[in-house]
Amino acid sequence: MVTHSYLFSRNIIPVIYYFFQFRAYVNKLRSKSTIYKKKRQVLQDLKAESGVVSRTVEILKSRDDNINKQLEALESKKGVAGYRDTQDELEKVGISLLGTNSTKLHVEITLINCAYFKGI
């Protein structure tokens, strides 16, 4: 019969322990490797998509410049040069007024609520 002390004296138990520990390490490494490969593929896909998007942006900017030049020529031809610039400025002012009016409305509602609750 083989005893526990015999197995220890022959270094069999530590070898078996390290074998299972190594196998667990290899399995953990395999799973990490799989995750790494998937994330690397996603990163490569995103880089490729980024290249496509940047090229699209370049194309759209060049088209925007061409359209702006055509609009300026058309405005000059029709006698309303600067109309688009004026329209853009009006939109910016309108947006800033919306923010101001929203703030004023919030203050007025707060004052009304305070006056109402004081009266109760």
Image (cartoon, grey):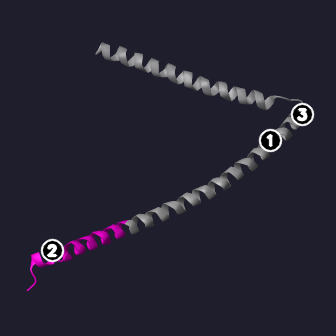
Front one among 54 and 120: 54
- Residue positioned most to the right: 77
Q: Is residue 3 above or below residue 93?
A: below
Q: Give the residue drawn at x 71%, y 52%.
A: 55
Residue 8 numbered mark, or none: 2
**Amino acid at pointer 1:** Asp
Amino acid type shown at disc 3: Lys
Asked whether, in this view, residue 2 is left or right of residue 37, the answer is left
Q: Is residue 72 magenta?
A: no
Q: Which residue is the site of mark 1?
A: 65
Find numbered disc 2 in the image and state the secondary structure of the residue it sits on.
Answer: helix
In the image, what residue occupies the spot 51% across and 19% down? Answer: 104
Q: 51 and 5: which one is in front?
A: 5
Q: Which residues are magenta?
A: 1-28
Eye-nearest disc, 2 or 3: 2
Where in the figure is residue 45, as x and y percent of width and height? 58, 60
Based on the picture, tell me whether residue 6 belongs to the magenta stretch.
yes
Whether 117 is drawn above or below 29: the answer is above
Q: Does residue 57 appear to the left or right of 111 in the view shown?
A: right
Tell me the CA gap for discs 1 and 2: 82 Å
Is the C-beta separation of discs 2 and 3 under 8 Å?
no
The mark nearer the N terminus, 3 or 1, is 1
- Disc 3: which residue: 78
Q: State the count of labels.
A: 3
In terms of secondary structure, what is the magenta stretch mainly? Answer: helix
Q: Nearer the viewer, mark 1 or mark 2?
A: 2
Sequence order check: which comes first, mark 2 or mark 3?
A: 2
